[in-house]
Image (cartoon, rainbow, N blue to C red):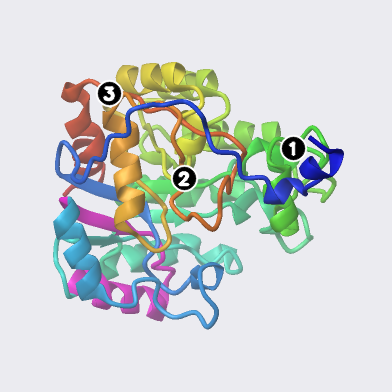
Amino acid sequence: MSDSSVDIPLADYRPRAAVKLPATRVERPAARAIDAHNHLGRWLTHWVRPGGGWMAEDVGALLALMDGLDIEAIVNLDGRWGAELEANLERYDGAHPGRFLTFCHVDWGEPERLVESLEASHAAGARGLKVWKDLGLSVRDGSGALILPDDPRLEPLWAAAGELALPVLIHTADPIAFFQPADATNERLEELAVHPEWALHGTGVPPFERLLEAFEAMVAAHPGTTFIGAHVCCCAEDLAWVGRMLATYPNLHMDFSQRIAELGRQPRAARRLFVEHADRILFGTDELPPSRAAYETYFRFLETADEHFPYWVDPERPWPQGRWQISALDLPAEVLPAIYRGNAARVLSV
């Protein structure tokens, strides 16, 4: 073999696994499901396609997909506030009762109106509060200082959510690799090369550990408020920390949307976490837009004993998060109904 035969860019390297393993297709979940983390509005559409518009361009087609997959309902996290919330509620919740549950946001630019805004959104029909990662990474006060989730000025907001029985689904920080130097040691270097704007090292944001401290302090200070830590409580790389959080704070839940790539490379630890805290984990995908292939991958991950398979569904984007494959959790049948639907139904009062 000549040297030139292997002189290819890493981005063009597409190894095919030589191991021969079973591949199980799971077309419907073992129990009826609620997708507790998705985006159906207009807020994040620019990430998916130019021109924006509604994430679900055809609601009828989405409902047909849901029926074919035994998805009872989808939580739409794109409600925002005011007229945008009303538009989401009209398009989804009002037009199709029981199939969609829209969460609101608050406008951090109007800090004196946070509680008032939440109360208005609740009255309009919002089913929860979505807090994005900009809180802690980019939201600033009048002096230019970053505002973190444990800022005392936000305590009335978290308390009001508890009083209104609105769960708070919060995304804090980002994957640990995004806070590390984008060098030869970074396991998500290829992803950061595609999205250099996601690299946080040296940008002046708080360290990852400080953001997790703020997240925990917020949860601890408001035991009467239900919090859902998005993406495995924002720390899928450290399941011992996540397990301690769930064991310590009864008001904390988690979804595992967009983190099967992390969970599937530590399947024994992940299975242990899911079994030990089966009453606190919510099924969610955060797949934009929802697709059959994505849902089937999640079903396979939860229900089968398959090993070494792709966590991604787009063949044009292999290894979107890291250059590895995953193994499934083979969860006990008795925990699946709670994870697929029961926990979300309880938290959302469905």
The three-letter amino acid code for the residue at tag 3 is Leu
Asked if 180 appears above or below 243 in the picture, the reply is below
The three-letter amino acid code for the residue at tag 2 is Gln
Find out whether the residues at labels 3 and 2 contact each other: C-beta distance under 8 Å. Answer: no
The residue that mark 2 highlights is: 258
Regarding residue 283, the answer to whether it shows in the image is: no
> Looking at the image, is mark 3 or mark 1 nearer the viewer?
3
Regarding residue 41, the answer to whether it shows in the image is: yes
> Looking at the image, is mark 2 or mark 1 nearer the viewer?
2
Which quadrant: the N terminus?
Answer: top right
Dot 1 alpha-carbon crowd within 10 angstroms: few under 14, some 14 to 19, many 20 or more: some
The residue that mark 1 highlights is: 207
Boundaries of the magenta span: 70-94
Residue at position x 44%, y 74% in the image: 42
- Mark before the other along the chain sequence, 3 or 1: 1
Q: Is residue 76 magenta?
A: yes
The residues tagged by marks 2 and 1 sit, at their Cα atoms, a distance apart of: 22 Å
Q: Is residue 201 magenta?
A: no
Residue at position x 27%, y 34% in the image: 24
The three-letter amino acid code for the residue at tag 1 is Pro
The residue that mark 3 highlights is: 331
Q: Position of residue 248 (x, y in %)?
A: 43, 19
Front position in the image: 280 or 250: 280
